[in-house]
């Protein structure tokens, strides 16, 4: 049996807690002078059988429940009926979410969710040793065979993107691929479970399910989710931009992560046609919408630029790009061609 | 009051209630209680036929005039009552869980009833029993005697195993005349043997009352964690988880209580199961009222 979070197996020690409490309680007894001893002795003799067995069973159940919780927290990867070396998998189809949210880091100084989950996948698949590993990433969408799980993190097909993910489409694509695959197969969905990526109301889930059920050998589906706490994050997005007279008006929005409270001062850097300026913004609460006016030199015809905030929990949402052009004047040119006219 | 087991307020409240005997008593002086013999009280008992040798002064001439037969008119004889308080002083009587120690409760009952008895002209005696000791204070009607009764009760220290059965058999054999025997004990002994002892008393025509004293904790058996139980009588130690054995304990105790009750009823004893948190006044008031003849209620 393999575990995605083997460190959490240390919590198996918690299974001994009920036994420890039982033993401590037995030692914690209070002494009492007792008169009706004959009934006590008789009761003790009578309760030795069933009661003791029931007590042991309850204790065992508590111990097993805690052990099961610890095992579940360690996220076991079970193959085959029993999970103990029972199955040899021929094909693993890896559906990788490469959306921008996968670049969120669980904490300061840690790697992004995408990098963490790729490492786990590499370790687990390295242990499972399937015959084929096929990757369908959310940006490319086409199946590509991976020669070794060790190269997963180095592939451009597993690199960060700013795009979203479409799991119904990816699953349908996996089902399509598996029609040609032989032997036992598993489909691994690697994601941070963002609603925008999973689209639970999408009708295509039905067709994807039907396609998977129609396969001659039904694959097992495994969701490798990576969620949990994240490092503090702020994002900047451009809502609209327009040019009025000699100014460029940018409607911007800065959002802070859900746990953010109070005011926060964030430096906002603006770069346009090579010139850079930095302003300080005070963001009250979790979001701030504002309009930024950028004066343009009189002879500016076109250009581009970006606004950015400092790197934080998710480096993929710290920059917003924009372009400016002078509105083209519509001109109509009437032309007439005359063929066959004598010169 | 000099002794802490005597409550003057309680005694003054109960003073108006007489302690009646449920069976005719055989006292040595005149008193308030019925005697099995005919006597010279004002209360008519019965007519019986004249036999040769009867005192002709007791002939009822009116009955002779009506029936032309000789009848002797008989009257009830009133006598006094002698009470024996048998107090179990075994180690188990020292138990105090939620109520006061059982021995203290027994002291209060014995002292209060003895005071009331002597106050109405009857005699009260005390018998204290353990497996090693059988101490007796003979019954007496004198008020000065009460002080000896009370001081013996006050010095009482429960210890050892119970000697109640031997004490009951001894009393049954020793007391020649009918008496009022009050047993104050937790009765932690074999119910069958207890039944034999009570039958022995009944055979001697004694009026038996049993106050079966139990602590509320002994009946409820409410504990929230393991306890090391040490027997008050022989020092046996048992470490147990009360929640695991409570059901069996209560069932065993219920069985014992019903066996004791049945044995008491078989011996026509007045049985009262009393928990030591019961207020004494209503207990004694009900006890005395229940003993009164129906006509006096």
Image (spheres, coloured by chain):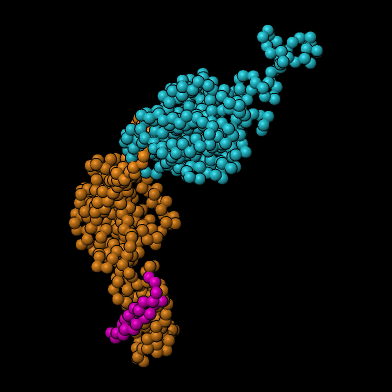
Chain colours: A orange, B cyan
- Residue B59, compared with residue A319, is above or below; it is above
For the C terminus of chain B, the image quarter is top right
**Residue B222 in view:** no
Instruction: Give residue B6's position: percent from left, percent from top.
Output: 50, 42
User: From what the image shows, is residue B264 above or below residue A188?
Assistant: above
Residue drawn 41% across the image and 53% down it? A205
Residue drawn 46% across the image and 20% down it: B173
Q: Is residue B134 left or right of residue B123?
A: left
In the picture, measured across the screen, residue B66 lies left or right of residue A268, that is: right
Give yes or no for residue A160 being in the magenta stretch.
no
Judge by depth and name the residue closer to the eye, A201 or A316. A316
Give x and y (percent) for residue A333: 43, 84
Residue drawn 22% across the image and 48% down it: A128
In the image, the segment drawn in magenta is A260-284
Task: Classify residue A215 as left or right of residue B121.
Answer: left
x 68%, y 21%: residue: B75
Residue extending farthest to the bottom is A298
Q: Which image quarter: residue A22? A: top left
Q: Residue B102: x percent and y percent?
A: 44, 38
From the image, give the main secondary structure of the stretch colored magenta.
strand
Up the image or down, A126 lies above or below B19; here it is below
Inspect the magenta stretch and tell me whether residue A267 lies in it: yes
Q: Position of residue A302 (x, y in %)?
A: 34, 84
**A7 vs B87: above or below:** below
């Amino acid at each position: 049996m393999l575990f995605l979070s083997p460190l959490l197996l240390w919590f198996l020690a918690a299974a001994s807690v009920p036994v420890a409490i039982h033993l401590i309680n037995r030692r914690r007894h209070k002494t009492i002078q007792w008169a009706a001893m004959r009934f006590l002795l008789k009761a003790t003799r009578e309760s030795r059988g069933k009661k003791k067995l029931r007590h042991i069973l309850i204790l065992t159940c508590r111990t097993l429940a805690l052990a099961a919780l610890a095992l579940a927290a360690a996220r076991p990867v079970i193959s085959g009926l029993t999970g103990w070396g029972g199955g040899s998998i021929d094909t693993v189809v890896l559906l990788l979410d490469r959306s921008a949210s996968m670049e969120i880091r669980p904490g300061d100084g840690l790697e992004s969710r995408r990098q963490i989950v790729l490492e786990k996948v590499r370790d687990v698949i390295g242990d499972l040793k399937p015959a084929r590993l096929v990757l369908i990433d959310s940006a490319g969408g086409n199946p590509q065979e991976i020669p070794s799980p060790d190269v997963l993190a180095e592939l451009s097909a597993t690199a960060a993107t700013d795009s979203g993910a479409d799991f119904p489409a990816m699953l349908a694509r996996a089902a399509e691929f598996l029609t040609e695959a032989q032997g036992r197969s598993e489909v691994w969905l690697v994601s941070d479970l963002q609603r925008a990526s999973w689209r639970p109301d999408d009708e295509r889930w039905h067709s994807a399910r039907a396609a998977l059920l129609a396969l001659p050998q039904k694959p097992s589906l495994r969701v490798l989710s990576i969620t949990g706490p994240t490092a503090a994050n702020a994002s900047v997005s451009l809502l609209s931009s327009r040019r009025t007279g000699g100014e460029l008006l940018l409607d911007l929005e800065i959002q802070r992560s859900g746990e953010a409270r109070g005011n926060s001062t964030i430096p906002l850097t603006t770069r346009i046609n090579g010139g850079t300026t930095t302003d300080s913004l005070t963001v009250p609460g979790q979001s701030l919408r504002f309009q930024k006016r950028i004066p343009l030199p009189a002879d500016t015809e076109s250009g581009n630029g970006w606004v950015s905030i400092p790197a934080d929990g998710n480096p993929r949402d710290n920059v917003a790009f924009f372009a400016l052009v002078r509105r083209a004047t519509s001109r109509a040119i009437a032309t007439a061609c005359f063929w066959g006219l004598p010169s | 009051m000099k002794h802490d087991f005597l409550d003057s307020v309680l005694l003054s409240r109960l003073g108006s209630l007489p302690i009646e005997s449920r069976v005719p008593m055989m006292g040595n002086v005149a008193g308030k209680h019925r005697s099995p013999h005919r006597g010279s009280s004002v209360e008519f008992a019965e007519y019986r036929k004249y036999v040769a040798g009867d005192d002709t002064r007791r002939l009822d001439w009116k009955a002779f005039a009506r029936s032309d037969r000789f009848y002797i008119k008989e009257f009830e004889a009133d006598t006094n009552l002698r009470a024996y308080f048998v107090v179990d002083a075994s180690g188990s009587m020292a138990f105090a869980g939620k109520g006061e120690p059982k021995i203290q409760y027994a002291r209060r009952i014995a002292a209060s009833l003895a005071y009331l008895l002597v106050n109405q002209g009857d005699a009260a005696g005390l018998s204290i029993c353990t497996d090693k000791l059988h101490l007796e204070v003979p019954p007496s009607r004198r008020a000065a005697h009460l002080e000896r009764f009370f001081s013996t009760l006050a010095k009482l220290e429960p210890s050892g195993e119970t000697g109640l059965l031997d004490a009951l058999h001894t009393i049954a054999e020793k007391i020649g005349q009918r008496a009022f025997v009050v047993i104050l004990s937790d009765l932690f002994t074999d119910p069958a043997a207890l039944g034999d002892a009570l039958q022995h008393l009944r055979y001697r025509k004694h009026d038996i009352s049993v106050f079966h004293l139990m602590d509320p904790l002994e009946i409820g058996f409410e504990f929230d964690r393991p306890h090391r139980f040490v027997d008050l009588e022989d020092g046996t130690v048992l470490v147990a988880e009360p929640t695991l054995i409570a059901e069996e304990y209560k069932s065993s105790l219920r069985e014992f209580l019903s066996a004791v009750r049945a044995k008491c009823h078989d011996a026509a004893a007045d049985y009262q199961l009393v928990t030591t948190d019961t207020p004494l006044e209503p207990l004694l008031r009900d006890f005395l009222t229940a003993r009164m003849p129906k006509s006096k209620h």
